[in-house]
Image (cartoon, rainbow, N blue to C red):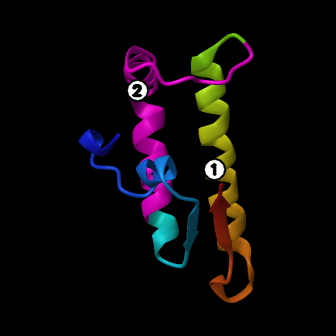
Amino acid sequence: MRALGLHILPSLATTDVRVSGQELAALEGEVNVLRAGLRGVVDALLEQGVQVVSNGDPYATVLARLENIGEAVRRAREMANGGGEVVID
């Protein structure tokens, strides 16, 4: 994922992610990059032996997770005074 220019989501490999304030736009951008290249991203993960826990369709599973993150970003932005935060662990 770093090859796609992503910085926030790849860090999940080693740590939890906490994003707030102006970083929310960066996280949203990373989600959009992955959505746009979903098939290639999932194919690459599977080729690397990454276990995608799914209901039988890894593409639908990854898309659902990306949609959840996108929704979390939207909700964080709605918090009073921009005080929302997205936490992924």
Tally of numbered tags: 2
Q: Position of residue 56 (x, y in %)?
A: 70, 10
Residue drawn where x is 45% and y is 17% of the image: 46
Decide whether the magenta segment is chiefly helix, strand or loop.
Answer: helix
Note whether 31 is above or below 44 in the view shown.
Answer: below
Q: Which residues are magenta?
A: 26-55
Q: Residue 7 appears in which quarter of the rendering?
A: bottom left
> Is 67 situated above or below 46?
below
Q: Secondary structure at mark 2?
A: helix
Q: Looking at numbered disc 1 in the image, what kind of residue is underneath it?
A: Ile
Residue 74 place in picture, x, y as percent: 66, 61
Percent position of residue 68, x then y: 69, 45
> Looking at the figure, which quarter contains the C terminus?
bottom right
Question: What residue lies at 48% left-to-right and 53% top-to-bottom?
Answer: 14
- Mark 2 residue crowding within 10 angstroms, few (<14) / some (14–19) / many (20+): some
Which residue was labeled with disc 1? 69
Which residue in the structure is indicated by mark 2? 41
How far is disc 2 from disc 1 in space, using C-alphas? 17 Å
